Image: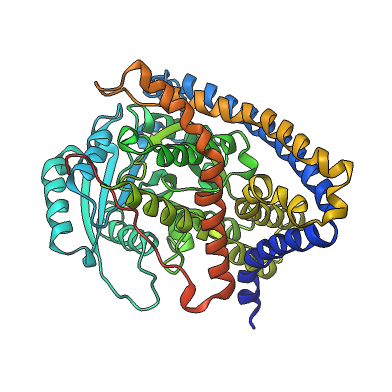
Amino acid sequence: MSLYRFLEMIPGLLTWATLIAIVTFSAIAPVYVALFIIVFDVYWLLRTAYFSFHLRATFNKMKAYLKVNWLEELNKLTPSESTPGWEDIYHLVILPMYKEPYEVVKESFESIRGTNYPKDKFILVLATEEKGGAEDQEVAGKIQNEFGSHFYKFLTTTHPKDIPGELAGKGSNETWAGKEVKRTIIDELHLNYENILVSVFDVDTQVPKEYFGRLTHAFLQEPDRQFASYQPIPLFTNNIFEAPSLARVIAFSCTFWQMMNQSRPERLTSFSSHSMPFKPLVEIGFWSVDHVSEDSMIFWQCYLHYNSHWKVVPLFYPVTMDANVAPKFWQTMINVYKQQRRWAWGAENVPYMIYGFIKNKSMPLRKKLYWSFHIIESFHSWSTNALLIFALGWLPLLIGGEQFNLTLLSYNLPQITRILMTLASIGIASSAILSILLLPPKPEWFKFKDYFFYLIQWLLMPLTLIIFGAMPAIESQTRLLLGGKLRLGFWVTPKMRSNS
């Protein structure tokens, strides 16, 4: 067995070792498991309070930033030898698409066209797939005809199918698009790589009016600007009123996790739609073409290439994307599960990261240990925490035997757990209120009574954490553990509108 293959097995081994240990020791040592469950519940309560603090801090900062005219703020900056003027910065925006309907793609381009930023500073690339067929080319043609003249440059690329060594997915498509725009536009015009910011957006991504002003301001204010990614907050609200309750809770849960991490930039890695300078992108050879999770993998490519001299700068500013919606409820649930499973496949970052740490002798050991623990712990928590809190905490009572069930600890375990979970539910209540505040403009049918249903939907959170959190994470880590034909490929989340 190769070292890399062993490292791939680590997330799954840890998860299954935890689950098996809880079941086994609940039967043979129920007292110790009961004590562990109580301590773990206290830890989870404290962690919930800690996360809620960061969530509120990010929300308040985002709310303040949304009121700023960032183009005016850019005009206040003074260029220097080390800092270019904002007028010198170009925005390369790459939007990979595969079988998305015209309405979804159009809305994204309309949002970019509507931004308060000079359009002659934009290079837009609509990156299609050959396997998308004539239908995708028709959509791309309509988009180019409608929007191409509104920007400095507009390029449509077609990523060939079945290139040896490539995994069919976003990473390979983005890399093809990035190399094409470099060859046909950037190099032809002799544009300075250091003055180009690359934003890779899912094709359903829509941006607020001041987004590119905020992005440019963050870039110019960052002293180490060429060695950083720039991360917005993903709000899955484009079609939130069309989504069923479970899908809404899951969408906001992802948003809240990203919001909490914005206030903890030392733990932030790139996710979904994000930006980075063009120069380091060229130097590392663009995005990985043989991994599913290219959005987070690009962080580790840069982190390893530059010997840990890389970070993610939080923008405290949103972009909006689609929540999971399908014509039928059960198809939506299946799609939600598959999307969560694909995100959980980000556990493939663990072997890539640790293998890179082992090979890289220039990086400080403390940084290797810090990131190894943090990333492994985050994937382990994803797959096990919800089960430990909401499902397996009762095992000592069920299989601990008659002797344990006669003890005072056995009697008090449900009471203590109930009290701790009730206190922790305050965090769920704050999430419910925050989700209301983050809703986009309400449709005509949305009445005052609907606020009630949008609040009580958060009672479903324990269910969503297990079925659409722990379970897809366990499946992904198990597939990575076993390898072979069980490995996941890239799954494209279907996009739709009620009129598409």
Residue 406 appears at what percent x and percent y? 87, 47
312 versus 476 height, above or below: above
Residue 281 in view here: yes
- The residue depicted at 48 percent of the width and 74 percent of the height is 486
When asked about the image quadrant of residue 67, the answer is top left
Query: Residue 4's spot in the image, x, y percent?
Result: 62, 74
Residue at the outermost bottom position: 1
Q: Residue at x 47, y 57 (%)?
A: 341
Tell me which residue sits at (36%, 22%) in the image: 450
Viewport quadrant of the C terminus: top left
User: Which quadrant would residue 74 be assigned to in this image?
Assistant: top left
How is the protein colored in the picture? rainbow
Relative to residue 228, is residue 32 drawn left or right?
right
Count the numbered circles shown: 0
Q: Is residue 26 left or right of residue 252?
A: right
> Where's residue 56, x and y in %?
58, 25
| 153 vs 211: above or below | below
Quadrant housing the N terminus: bottom right
- Residue located at (41% from left, 26% from top): 453
Query: Can residue 31 be seen in the rendering of this structure?
Result: no
The answer to which of 328 and 9 lies nearer the viewer is 328
